[in-house]
Image (cartoon, rainbow, N blue to C red):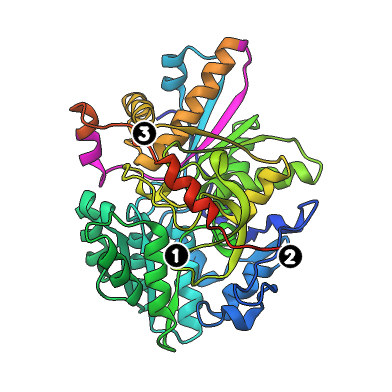
Amino acid sequence: MSEQTKYLLEENQMPRFWYNIQADLPTPAPAVLHPGTLQPVGPADLAPLFPMDLILQEVSQEREIEIPEPVRDVFRLWRPAPLYRARRLEKLLGTPAKIFYKYEGVSPAGSHKPNTAIPQAFYNQQSGVKRLVTETGAGQWGTSLAFAGSLFGLTVEVFQVRVSYDQKPYRRAVMETYGARCVASPSMETVFGRSVLEKTPDHPGSLGIAISEAVELAVQREDTKYALGSVLNHVLLHQTIIGQEAMEQMKMADTWPDVVIGCAGGGSNFAGIAFPFIGHGLRGGQKSRALAVEPAACPSLTRGKYAYDFGDTGRMTPLTKMHTLGSQFTPPGFHAGGLRYHGMASLVSHCKELGLVEAVAYHQVECFEAGVAFARCEGIVPAPESNHAVKGAIEEALRCKREGKAETILFCLSGHGHFDMASYQKYFAGELTDEGYDEVDLAASLLGLPQVP
């Protein structure tokens, strides 16, 4: 790999602070509300779920929050992550654009998720927590929290969405290798899980259901807390290490992105790559377009309603204002399991409402087509989720070709697809189809949104 193509930071150049976009937004994001009183939640309301350090980060308005040294010490296993220029992909497309990608698949878990799993495990361990419960879709988050738990001596239990549990057995095996226990959701282990199975015994599951099951267990024991891999402010905060590193690497490449792209399900890797660049523009620096790419089968940003909603199907969580398909919405079983969530992160949603974020949705077959083209040019097999970002970057490069513009494109390749090869096998066999959602079900889910004045 030539020096012109790969850009590496030294270990001592790894960021020492997370970036909090809330300090730079022209208007603050809407408050999170208690579902009973409809009043803004306070620390006491969140204490059953999270340690105080994470609660304070969730509501912080400080621009910079220091990364603890024990966390940075673990990050040194794979960070700083590399930035590449995709010259072979540029040649294939015949585009005048420069295409760069920040590769997060170099982490032990194979994705960007350890960027928040490590600090969450650290803060929980520091507060005396012994057990973490969580949910996972494709398994990248469950794998990452299992890894983090093994480092900080925490027991980890994971509710994995049933359709992904069946589609991706090797993800489950990796979680168990790291010491976690993985259960298919909906399960018989919680009151809410049993209620779902009683109505629909073959329910494919959803992230909303799995969240409900994990939250139900978390509040039952004082030594147990809940951990979430996306959506929440503190999770997005932790992921900004991606964009901060990328900013320094773009300077090394003597260029700056005209557009920054990430796949989007709950919003964590998109925010991680995009928020530092958005903040740079808000503070008077060079502006970049921020483009979120989501699945057409679960299009919260492009098809959802901006409204207050529950983060889970069982309606146990506080109310958050976000782009949502409704907490009762069950996405079809497409292979990008990490993007099968009914709502988008509040901060990402707020940024879209402010005109700071654009969004587009693509179907899974065309995303796999883009991922295969990328793999044959650049050598990395992307995760099905990451294929959406690849598709978005290719479409932007082709636009530049049509318009004769030599723009610079940066996208986050959030993880590798080594545990997702069954989906690639289906793609090559012609068995992968574009999953669609039921418009009637979506309408009914949106009608069931909570009534907030």
Q: Is residue 382 above or below residue 21?
A: above
In this rendered view, identify the residue nearer to me: 111 or 318: 318
Say few, some or many: other residues with alpha carbon within 10 Å of mark 3 (under 14 / 14 to 19 / 20 or more).
Answer: many
- Say which mark, if any, is on residue 364: 3
Q: Residue at x 59, y 77 (%)?
A: 53
The amino acid marked with disc number 3 is Gln
**Mark in front: 3 vs 2:** 3
- Mark 1 to mark 2 CA distance (whole Å): 22 Å
Question: Where is the N terminus found, in terms of image quarters?
Answer: top left
- Disc 2 is placed on an element classified as loop
200 relative position to 227: left or right:
left
Identify the magenta region. Answer: 403-425
Residue that mark 2 sits on: 61
Give the quadrant of residue 150: bottom left
Q: Spatial distance from mark 3 to mark 2, Cα to Cα? A: 37 Å
Marker disc for residue 117: 1
Task: Verify CB contact (< 8 Å) between mark 1 and mark 2.
Answer: no
Q: Is residue 57 above or below residue 106?
A: below
Number of dots carrying numbers: 3
Report the quarter where the C terminus lies: bottom right
Residue 115 x, y percent position in the rendering: 48, 58
